[in-house]
């Protein structure tokens, strides 16, 4: 299992253990983490699961073309650490910390 820590806008944090192969988005939704919507269900088509990765980006696979396009449409400002949480899978890390933006839509 992989550990995912979500940091809310108010600075609160919640850490969950996610099943192998789960996305950071799916783990958040399954565990009631507020701040991630995931309207498209994880297809990199809506940007409502935007997060800022606090952990080293070097541990993650690169940004694909679809994700890159959606990151240009985020409701909150895009940063160098911006990713779509639906594209981050537990198979790629043992633990990760992500900060939630102030809005998704």
Image (cartoon, rainbow, N blue to C red):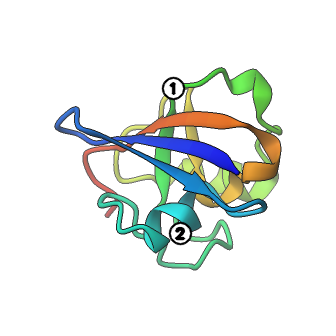
x and y, in percent, of residue 45 in the image: 62, 71
- In this rendering, is residue 82 above or below 57? below
- In this rendering, is residue 24 above or below 6? below
Who is closer to the viewer here, 8 or 82? 8
**Side (left or right) of 5 relative to 81:** left
**Side (left or right) of 69 relative to 100:** right
**Side (left or right) of 100 relative to 57:** left
Query: Which residue is found at the position 27% from the left and 53% from the top?
Result: 103
Query: Which residue is found at the position 57% from the left and 68% from the top?
Result: 26
Quarter occupied by the C terminus: bottom left
- In this rendering, is residue 89 above or below 59? below
Q: How far apart are marks 1 and 2 (CA)?
A: 22 Å
Q: Of the two numbered discs 1 and 2 on the same chain, state the one appearing first in sequence.
A: 2
Q: Residue 54 carries which label?
A: 1
x and y, in percent, of residue 62 in the image: 81, 38
x and y, in percent, of residue 43 in the image: 68, 73
Q: Tell me which corner region of the image, top left, top right, bottom left or bottom right, holds residue 66.
A: bottom right
Q: Tell me which corner region of the image, top left, top right, bottom left or bottom right, holds residue 63.
A: top right
Q: Badge 2 is on which residue?
A: 46
- In this rendering, is residue 25 above or below 56? below
Who is closer to the viewer here, 51 or 78? 51
Depth check, mark 1 against mark 2: the one in front is 1
Who is closer to the viewer here, 105 or 9? 9
Query: Which residue is found at the position 72% from the left and 37% from the top?
Result: 94
Q: Dot 1, how many residues are within 10 Å of its Cα: few (below 14), some (14-19), or many (20+)?
A: some
Query: Which residue is found at the position 40% from the left and 61% from the top?
Result: 36
């Amino acid at each position: 299992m992989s550990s995912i820590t979500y940091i809310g806008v108010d600075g609160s944090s919640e850490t969950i253990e996610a099943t192998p192969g789960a996305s950071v988005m799916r783990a958040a939704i399954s565990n009631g983490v507020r701040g991630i919507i995931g309207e498209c269900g994880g297809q990199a088509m809506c940007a409502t699961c935007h997060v800022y990765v606090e952990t080293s980006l070097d541990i993650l696979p690169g940004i694909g073309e679809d994700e890159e396009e959606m990151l240009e449409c985020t409701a909150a400002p895009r940063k160098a650490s911006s990713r779509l949480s639906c594209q981050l899978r537990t198979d790629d890390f043992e633990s990760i910390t992500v900060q939630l933006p102030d809005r998704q839509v």
